[in-house]
Amino acid sequence: MKKNTYITFGIILIIIAFIVFGLVQCSAGQRFLKTAYSDVSGGLERTVDVYDYSGNMIATYEGKIDIEYSDYGNKVLFDMNGKRVVIYNAIVIVNEK
């Protein structure tokens, strides 16, 4: 390899190291990494509580749950133990264990 190739490769490694270090050090980066881990591993250990608009509990789900976020706010979709769960028009509280 040429000397310039080594220098370019070294610069790229330094840039990647700074990006990874920056992600780990800030809260937004930690959230991003946790979301990426959840996406890759099939979810995180969570408890999902579902309430109607009067405050009555409808259901509780526990296990390794992968949440899919909705921009519309009236639907929550998640996978739990290989089964798809879709909840419309309810109050959903998700707690990570």
Image (cartoon, rainbow, N blue to C red):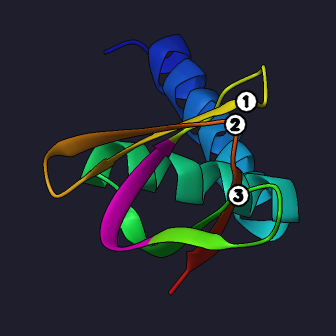
Residue holding disc 2? 89
Q: Position of residue 70 (x, y in %)?
A: 67, 26
Q: Earlier in the sequence, mark 2 or mark 1?
A: 1
Which of pointers 1 and 3 lies earlier in the amino acid sequence?
Answer: 3
Dot 2 crowding, Cα within 10 Å, few <14, some 14–19, many 20+? few
What residue do we see at 30% from left, 67% from top?
64
Q: Position of residue 23 (x, y in %)?
A: 73, 54
Question: CB under 8 Å between callouts 2 and 1?
Answer: yes
Given the image, on which type of amino acid does mark 1 rest?
Answer: Asn
Task: Indicate which disc, 3 or 2, sits on the residue closer to the N terminus.
Answer: 3
Q: CA distance from mark 2 to mark 1?
A: 5 Å
Q: CA distance from mark 1 to mark 3?
A: 12 Å
Q: Where is mark 1, residue-wise?
A: 74
Q: Is residue 94 magenta?
A: no
Asked if marks 1 and 3 touch (Cβ < 8 Å), the reply is no
Q: Is residue 91 left or right of residue 7?
A: right
